[in-house]
Image (cartoon, rainbow, N blue to C red):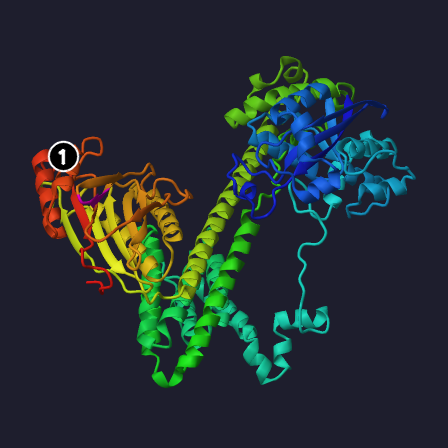
Amino acid sequence: MQYIILDMEWNQPWPGSYSAKKALPSPMRGEIVQIGAVRMTQEQQIADEFQILIRPQYFKKMNRKVASLTGIRDSLLREKGVRFPEAAAQFAAWCGEDCVFLTWGFDDITILRENLAVFGLESGWTARWYNAQLIFNAQTDGSGAQKALSTAMQMMDIAPTRAAHDALGDAYHTALVCQHLRLADGIAAYEAAVQAHENGFHGAELPGCVRRAVFHGYADKTAALGAMSGRALLSTGDKEKEEHPYAPLFILLGVLMAASSFETADGFAPGRILSMLAVLLFAFERGSAFAIPAALCIGLGMDLGAGGGSFVHAASYAFSAVLVNVTARGNRVLSALWFALSILCFALPMNAHAGLVLLYEGLAATLLFLLIPSRFLRGKRLCSDEAAQEDAAVRRKIAASAAALRELYDSIARPRTLTEENPAAIFDRAAEKVCRGCALCSYCWEKEYQRTYTALNDATAALLRRGQGRGEDFPSYFSERCIHFSSFLSAVNGELRAYLLRRQYRRLLEDDRAKAASQYAQLSELMQSAADGALRPVSTQPVHSYEIGLSLRPKRGERVSGDSAAHFETEDGTLCLLLSDGMGCGEAAQRESSMAARMLERFLSAGIDAPPALKTLNSALSLRAESTDSFTTVDLLTLSLQTLEGELYKYGAAPSYLKRGGTVRRVTCSCLPAGLQEGSPPPEATHIKLSPGCFFVMLSDGVADSLDDEWLQNLLAGWEGHDPQQLVAAILADSMEKRGGTDDAGVLALYIPEDSGGAQAV
């Protein structure tokens, strides 16, 4: 056996850069740019060295801080660096088979395994690994605190002879420290050292500073912590109580969480109804500075009380508070209406039962709000100047809340050190139960240790693949020699089941964390877009008039069409044309397409930009598709009525056509329908420029075959009329003749009259 003392340097992308946002095959905190290692014999004598530079593939631009710290520049990596798969192969070959890895800390081996996973390479050869820090602590001062390598060298009176922050130099200095340790004894007692470590093992967060915060307006840390806990509010007077009314909020949250644990047979919880009522009252009575954080806090409390890893209450409550605060302006009826509509938006994508529960609880809270006598509600009644100032403040608070949610998303989505548990622990625990009292224990685990280890290692793959160990998985020289083999095999299977359950649990936790992060990201985008839309100045330019033609024809034999369409104007003078085609036909398809159309209309009408609205719609439909196996095409045009310029977005939609005189332009896309792929980016926008006298036509795939639409282009090119409704009727008539009504057909046509310049929209 030999020891491999390992150290590495890795590059990290600059926050917010393109590399930081790039999708990776698996989580990777840093991409390795240098590997340095020292080989040490079993007698702890330095025997060999290894060093290699690696040219990064994902984080290609060297971080300035990393380059400054290590001295590794882009030019050096381009000149002397190799690709990681080649470097990993060379390093593994240099290490050999019978080796134990030692690193100073937890990070290096984790980064190595993350890089191997990203490149699809095997990581089993790194399984025998130990943190030299823990061995050093156990054999020196016995503390659980991590020590810098330089500190350990000073304690051992070792003078540095190589450059620091160089992989080979740090590995060499670590080897010098290891020469002063009893490595064999340290490895034998490693489990005890791990238990002494205050934060555990296998990917636990390292001890040290968890969070740093600066508190303004407080004399010291004690005063700040007192204010956070609410104690300061009890003794500072009425003014402070008004400015920091969060102590009663925590008391209210505790009461609501306790009440939410009581549910009816149908799953309705009075506590959740009261929590929604509290959110609605906060949004109506208080400003956004209090209402939005309170809504998030109460929603998170309901989610934690419900369990299951969903954050739907936090998202729906916060979004409801935003809409009520921004749009209602102290109007009680409007507040109730916007609250109910926001809850409906979150209920629609959920499964039938959970969606109905959320919707009915929201309606119950809305009814209770309307039944409260007016004398107990003051609302926010502002004069015009105050209202303008309040609007600006609200927008800033919304943007700040969106930024906070983005930060929360970043913290949740940040790759974590989740090292897989070493399967060798299965045999260690089984041997602890069976072998400790055996007469041959010392023979098997001391004299024949290597053969025993090899036998167990050979059986590991079959155990993990099958989920159960059998006698034939073990070499005969082991199974025949073991006098308690049946008991040992039974203990192994018991530990294997526990190991597989722990692994499954870790993966479920990761899935829940990813879903929670996605929900926070979506909510952040929506809130930021709403803030941006509210701050966008309304143009005073004259708008162009327009005319709309629309017709939806069901499939032959069906009562309703599976297509849905809408056209509306937003407050900033944008005309939105929307056509949606649900999968299949009839009522089922109509439900899917109409839901998509309604959600988009509400988002766009609220001032949310098209990309985040479409991204949120896709995520909602993806969640819904898990139970309905359905998807929807979306065709969306957002057109400025001042400039007649706009953007066209297509989620799997049929081609659209722009007719200008006798010329017809065909606009297509290659994006999948909405709901097929969760987390996918919104479709790329196609810039559209209209002019007076032109037509723009959107249609579903039941009208024409996208590969055989010459007849449609000829019809449009030869059309000389000015009535978009007549054009729609002509298109559907020719479509029926050519396709026989074998599918739902929807056509939406926009016409800009010749004399529309400077006119008002009609």
In the displayed structure, would residue 233 be above or below residue 629? below
The C terminus - image quarter: bottom left
Rendered-image quadrant of the N terminus:
top right
Can residue 568 be spotted in the picture? yes
Q: Quadrant of residue 385?
A: bottom left
Left or right: residue 663 compared with residue 361? left
Q: Left or right: where does residue 53 sit relative to residue 388?
A: right
Residue 60 placement, left or right of 179: left
In depth, the one of 323 and 557 nearer the eye is 323
Image height of 544 relative to 216, above or below = above
Provide the residue designation for mark 1.
711
Q: Which residues are magenta?
A: 657-661
x and y percentages locating residue 521 in the rendered image? 47, 52
* Frontmost residue, 203 versus 416: 416
Question: Is residue 149 within the magenta segment?
Answer: no
Instruction: Check the image and name the residue furthest to the right.
Output: 157
Seen at 49% across and 50% down, the residue is 517
Mark 1, secondary structure of its residue: helix
Left or right of 369, for residue 735? left
Instruction: Tell me residue 548's x, y (percent).
Output: 17, 55
Quarter-wise, where is residue 193 in the image?
top right
The percent position of residue 265, horizontal first and vertical second, equals 34, 59
**In the image shown, does 650 or 511 lie closer to the viewer?**
650
Question: Of all residues shown, which one is farthest toward the bottom?
Answer: 375
